[in-house]
Image (spheres, grey):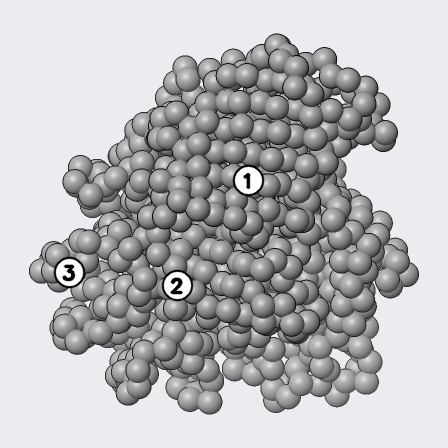
Amino acid sequence: MRDASPTTIYLKDHTPFGYIVDSVHLTFDLVPHATRVTSRIAFRPNPDAEDKTFFLHGEELKLIRTAIDGQEVTPELTDKGLTCPVPDAPFTWEAEVEIDPGNNTALEGLYMSNGMYCTQCEAEGFRKITYYPDRPDVMSTFSVRINGPHPVLLSNGNPTGSGDGWAEWTDPWPKPAYLFALVAGELVAHSDRFTTRSGRDVALNLYVRPGDEGKCAFGMEALKKSMTWDEDVYGREYDLDVFNIVAVDDFNMGAMENKGLNIFNSSAVLASPETSTDANFERIEAIIAHEYFHNWTGNRITCRDWFQLCLKEGLTVFRDAQFTSDMRSASVKRIHDVIDLRARQFPEDQGPLSHPVRPESFQEINNFYTATVYEKGAEVIGMLKRLVGDEPYAKALDLYFDRHDGQACTIEDWLQVFEDATTRDLSQFKRWYSQAGTPRVKVEEDWADGTYTLTLSQSTAPTPGQSEKQPQVIPVAVGLLGPNGDEVLGTQMLELTKESQSYTFDGLAAKPVPSILRGFSAPVVIDRDTTPAERAFLLAHDTDPFNRWEAGRALAQDTLLRMITEDAAPNADYLDGLLAVLRDDSLDPAYRALMLGLPTQSELAAALHERGTTPDPMAIWTAVETLRQATAQHMQDLLPRLHGQSLIDAPYRPDAEQSGKRALGSAALALISRLDGGAQAAGEYARADNMTLQLSALSCLLKSGKGETELAAFYDQWQHDRLVIDKWFGLQIALAAPDKTPGLTKTLTEHADFNWKNPNRFRAVMGALAMNHAGFHHESGAGYELLADWLIRLDPVNPQTTARMCTAFQTWKRYDADRQDLIRAQLMRILAQLDLSRDSREMLERIKAA
Ligand code: BES
Ligand code: ZN
C-alpha cells in the first residue's frame, strides 16, 4: 500500500528507543518466493528512555508467528510495523515471517539478482526482512544461520560454522540493522590475505559470478592499499578475521559498507583493461577505499539518526579523497572534485532541492543521499582541517575514535571533539551544517601608497525554508603575484567571519595580482570583476595549481558567455594562454588534459541565468562547438605531439601516470577529429587494445558523424558484457546532436538489451539523455516527455532509482517560459499517477515548488 499522506520526520523530534537490544539471532531458510526469516532478539527496557512503546518496524512481511519468552503473542499490525505489550524486564522476542525476495524489484531488503540472493538495508531496508527497531541508534551483535542449497552463503562478521546447505556467521561488533547483509549464490572467490600492523591475519575475498574472475585483481589491490593507508594515516586497523566483498549486477547505488561484507554494484568493482576505462579504474579504487574506510567512520562509530548522515558520509568522502590524493596526483584530484561539486552540488544548492548538509526534516531518507550531504559535507570537513591545522585535525580524530567507539553519534559530538582538542569555538562554524545555499564572496581591491587592500563580503541567497542567512566562517586562501609573475606573498589563510572584512598587505612595490580561493579552500562562488588579461596572467603564472587551472576555466567561461550573448569571437587571450600551457611539457599530462576542459553546458546555462539572461540551450551548444573548433585550429600544430602521449610503449597500467597521458592524448584526438573529420580516429579505433582508447576513438568518430560501422562492431564485440554494453548505450546518447537526441534515445529504449529494471542500464540511457543538455532541452519537449514516460514506468518497480532521476528536472526554472510550461506539464503528469511512490512524490513536489 502506498502512503496517501506521507509523514514528515523532524530532527527535533528525536527520542531514544524504549528498549536496548542485547543480541539478535536470525535464521534464513532461502526460497525465492517464500523465504522464512526467524528472529530471536534479547530486549531489555532502556533506562534512559521515557517512551516505552514497543514498536517494531516491518514492511511487506507476512507474519507467521510471534512469541515473548516462549509464549505466543498477537501484536497489533499496521503497514509500517507492529506494537505489542511487553514485560517491564528483559525478555526474548521471537518472530517468524515470510518474504518474497524473488519479486523484490525495488532492490531494498532481501532481493535476487541473476539467481543470487543479496541484501541492501541502508537506510531503512532491514524492516523488509523482519520486524525490528530499524533505526541506527539501536545497535546489537548479530549471529546468523543461513539454510540454502547455494555453495556460497555469507553474512557479516566471522564464519562460525558451515556444512552441506548451511552456514553460520557471528559478528562480535555491535551494529545497527542497516549494516546487516546476507549473500547466497553460486559465486567464485578471488582471495588474498592481509596482515594488520598489530599482526591480525585477515582473509580477503572478492566474490563474483563465474566468468568475472578475471576482473578482480585491481579491486583486491585497491582494498589492500586502503587497509594500509588507513593504518598509516588514521591509525585504524581492521577488526575481523575476514573481509568479504561481493559484486552484484542489480544495485541501486555504487556500493555498501555492510560490516565485514561489503556489497558492490558490479560497475563499482569489476575491472579489466579491455573492458574498463581509466576513469572506471580510478572510481573503483576510490569506492573500495570509501566503503572500507566506513568500517571506522560509519560502522564502529555510526549515526544517531539519519539526519546525521553527513557524519559518516561527508567524513568518509573526505577520507577517500585524501586517499586518492595520496595514491595519485593531489592537484588533479582536487580539480576533479571541484568540477564534480560545481556540476552536481551547486545546482542542487542553488535550486528547489537545496537543503543543509544536515537536513532538519525529510519524508523519504533515500532522497537525502545527495551531493550536498556527501560532497559539501566533505568540503566542510576540509575547511575544518584548514582552519585548525593538520596536527590538531589528527588529534581531534584520535579523540573522536577514542571517545565514541561503539556509539551512534551526532554532528554535535563531532564538533565537540574539535573544540576539546583545539580549544577553538566552533559555534559559528556549525552554520555550515544548518544553513543551505552556496555562499557568494564578493572581492574588491584597493591600492594606495604601497598598501594593497582586499575587501571580502559574503552573502547567501534564500533557500527553501530559510529566508535569512547568517554570515559563515569562510577560509579564503589568498596569494599575491607581482607584475612579473613572481609570487610576492605566499598562500595566506584569510578567515572571513563577518559579512564584510578588509585585509591589508603592506610594503609592496607594485600593485599585485591576487590569486583568490587557492585550492578551492571553501565551497563558495567568488564574484569579482576581472579582465581576461588578468585571468590570462594567472593562467600563465599562478603557483597554485588549482587556481592556475581555475584561471583557464574562468577565461573559457568568459569567452563562451560573450560568444553567446554578444556574438563575440573566441577570445585570443584564452586561445593563446591555453596553447602556452599545453605546450609546456614540464606540466603533468593529466593536468594539461584538465586545462583543455570546458564548463559544462548546464553550468553555462546557470551562469547566464545568474546574469539575468534566459539561457538558450541551442545557443550554448553552438558556442561550445565553435570554441572547440577554434581551439582545434589554434593548436593544430601541437595536436599530433599531444596525441602521441596516449601511444604508450609499455603494458597497460591504470595508474595516474599512464591514465594522464591517455587523457591528454584522447583530448587531442578529439580536436584532431574536428579538423580531419575523424580520419585518424578510425585508425586509432582499429588499433586500440584497451577500453580507454577504444572508447575515446569511438567518441571521436560519433562526434564526427561517422562510426556507424565501428559502433556495430563494438556491440558485436562486447554484447556478452553488461558493463560495456552500458557504455555502448550511454555513449551514443551523450554524443548525439541535439535534434537527434530524444529520437535516438527512444529508439534505444526499444532495443532488446534495454533491460530497464536494471538500474545501471536505466541510468546509462536516461542519465545520458538528461546529461545531453541541448538534446534533453530540445524545444519540442520530446526529451522531457520521454524521460517522464520512463519515470512513470520505473516508479512502481524501483522508487529509489526513479526518485534520483527526477533531479534531471531540478533546474527547470532557469529556462524560458515555453520550456517551463513543457516541463511543468510533465511534472504534473508524473504527479498525477495515483500510486506514485513516496520517494518520487517528495522529489517532484519539491522541484515543482521552485
Ligand atoms: N552507504 C553508502 C551506500 C548507500 C547509499 C546505501 C544510500 C543506501 C542508500 C555508501 O557508503 C556510499 O556512499 N556509496 C557511494 C559511493 C561513494 C564512493 C561515495 C555510492 O553508492 O554512490
Ligand atoms: Zn558512504
Q: In x, y percent, where is residue 14?
A: 75, 30
Q: Classify 547 as above or below 320.
A: below
Residue tagged 2: 190
Q: How would you rate the neighbour count of disc 2 (Cα within 10 Å): few for under 14, some for 14-19, many for 20 or more?
A: some
Q: Is residue 458 visible?
A: yes
Residue tagged 1: 144
Q: Classify 561 as above or below 21.
A: below
Residue 717, numbered label: 3
**Residue type marked 3:** Gln
Q: In x, y percent, where is residue 355?
A: 63, 39
Is label 3 in a helix, a strand or a loop? helix
Residue 377, numbered label: none
- Quadrant of the image occupied by residue 446: bottom right
Q: In percent of the image, x 68 and y 62: which residue is there?
A: 382
Q: In percent of the image, x 30 and y 59: which residue is there?
A: 212
Q: In x, y percent, where is residue 394?
A: 76, 68
**Which is in the foreground here, disc 3 or disc 1?**
1
In-front residue for pair 336/320:
320
Q: In x, y percent, where is residue 434?
A: 73, 42
Q: In percent of the image, x 48 and y 18: which residue is there?
A: 62
Q: Can you tell me whether the CB of the residue at mark 2 lies under 8 Å from the nearest atom of ligand 1? A: no
Q: Classify 657 as above or below 432.
A: below
First in residue order: circle 2 vs circle 1: 1
Compute the Cα span from label 3 to label 2.
Answer: 26 Å
